Amino acid sequence: MSLGTLVVVVASVVLLAAAVLQLRAGPLPFPAIITAALTSSLCYTVGGATAEESTAPSIPIVMGSLVGVMALVAMVVSLVPRTPQADRERRAPLVIAAAGTIVGSLGLLLHQLL
């Protein structure tokens, strides 16, 4: 296992832990959206390093695209105006962004460990 692989695996595990903590923490979706965007950029970085070796898109590039779309959906859903009480109880943007982080992290782990 090389140093680069170890760094990506550790970063993926940290992102998974961050997603779980954000789901448990509270109703604000923006930290989870930012974490999903960071996960997407990490997926693209890892996928770009491996894209030179193959002709088909790699797992991290596909997962990075999926996580990026999920982060955008979470942003749009969080900006839809509602009543103040409904805003405090709404968890959909948080769940969408955390799910994107989990999907991206699992994709990175799958790519590195296979």
Image (spheres, rainbow, N blue to C red):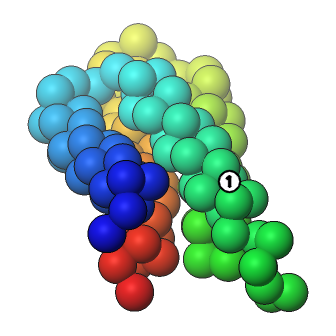
Q: Residue at x 44, y 54 (%)?
A: 4
User: Could you classify mark 1 by the number of other residues whose Cα lies within 10 Å: few (under 14), some (14-19), or many (20 or more)?
Assistant: many
Residue in front for this viewpoint, 35 or 110: 110
Residue in front for this viewpoint, 20 or 10: 10
Q: Residue at x 38, y 62 (%)?
A: 2
Q: Is residue 85 above or below residue 91?
A: above
**Residue 49 horizontal side relative to residue 35, left or right:** right
Residue 112 location in percent, x, y? 42, 72
Q: Residue at x 68, y 53 (%)?
A: 44
Residue in front for this viewpoint, 92 or 63: 63
Task: Let me know if residue 24 appears in the view.
Answer: yes
Residue 52 location in percent, x, y? 81, 71
Task: Let me know if residue 65 appears in the view.
Answer: no
**Residue 39 horizontal side relative to residue 51, left or right:** left
Residue 29 location in percent, x, y? 41, 28
Q: Which residue lies under the disc numbered 1?
A: 44
**Residue 59 horizontal side relative to residue 99, left or right:** right
Q: Is residue 32 above or below residue 9?
A: above
Residue type marked 1: Tyr
Residue 58 location in percent, x, y? 67, 78
